[in-house]
Each structure stands twice: as structure tokens, then as C-alpha cells.
Image (cartoon, rainbow, N blue to C red):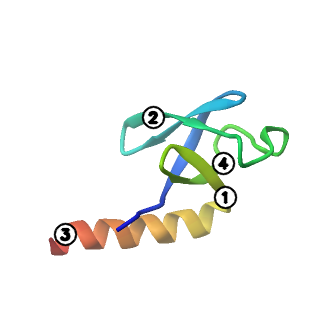
Amino acid sequence: MCLAVPMKLVEINAPEAVVELAGVRRKINLALLSPDELEIGDYLIIHAGFAIQKLDREDAEERLKYFEEMVRIL
């Protein structure tokens, strides 16, 4: 099963960037998005080390709530 996770953009060094979730930072690739359209603080969907979509804050926070619920159930 594949999982794409919303993460917050904290650093841009195109074509790479650093994203964060729950205090964990990861270096990711921006090749599938336009770095010119991104700003620090944006939420991105990350899959297999690539940013594949930009999300608005409300959508990202809602998705993250679902992830938290799944973790509690498991």
C-alpha cells in the first residue's frame, strides 16, 4: 500500500526542499511542482520522496486529523 502524507514546507533549495511533520524533517524533491509557486509554510502532499501536490492549510489539517485517528485506532 502507498501512502501520501501532508507535510509542512520549511525550507526551499530547488529542486529540493525540507518538509516537517510532528517534529520530523525530511528532504524531498520538488521536480513535480513549480518551486516558484511555493512558500515556506505551505502544505504539500509527499509521496515516495516527491512533493506531488500543494494543499491549502485547512485541507492539510483535516487530512492530518484522519492520520491521527488511524494511529489511535491501531
Which residue does the numbered mark 4 point to in the structure image? 42
Q: Is mark 4 on a helix, strand or loop?
A: loop
Circles 1 and 4: CB atoms closer than 8 Å:
no
**How many neighbours does mark 4 have within 10 angstroms: few (below 14), some (14-19), or many (20 or more)?**
some
Which label number is shown at residue 53? 1
> Upstream in the sequence, badge 3 or badge 4?
4
Q: Which mark is residue 26?
A: 2
Q: In this view, does 20 lie to the left or right of 70?
A: right
Q: From the image, which quarter does the C terminus lie in? A: bottom left
Q: Where is residue 16 in the image (x, y as percent from the top left)?
A: 64, 30
Image-quadrant location for residue 29: top right
Seen as rendered, the residue at the extreme front is 1
Question: Measured from the top left, where is residue 34 in percent x and y?
Answer: 80, 44
Q: Residue under circle 3?
A: 72
Residue at far left of view: 74
Q: Quadrant of the N terminus?
A: bottom left
Q: Which amino acid does the dot numbered 1 rest on?
A: Gln
Identify the residue shown where x is 70% and y is 30%: 15
Residue shown at the point (55%, 63%) measured from the top left: 60
The picture places residue 70, in percent across and down from the top left corner, at 27, 72
Q: Which residue lies furthest to the top in this view?
A: 13
Residue in the image at 48% along x and 69% along y: 63
Q: Do the residues labelled 3 and 4 touch (CB within 8 Å)?
A: no
1 or 3: mark nearer the eye: 1
Q: Residue at x 62, y 60 (%)?
A: 57
Q: How far apart are marks 2 and 3 (CA)?
A: 23 Å
Find numbered disc 3 in the image and state the secondary structure of the residue it sits on: helix
Cα separation, mark 2 vs mark 4, equals: 15 Å
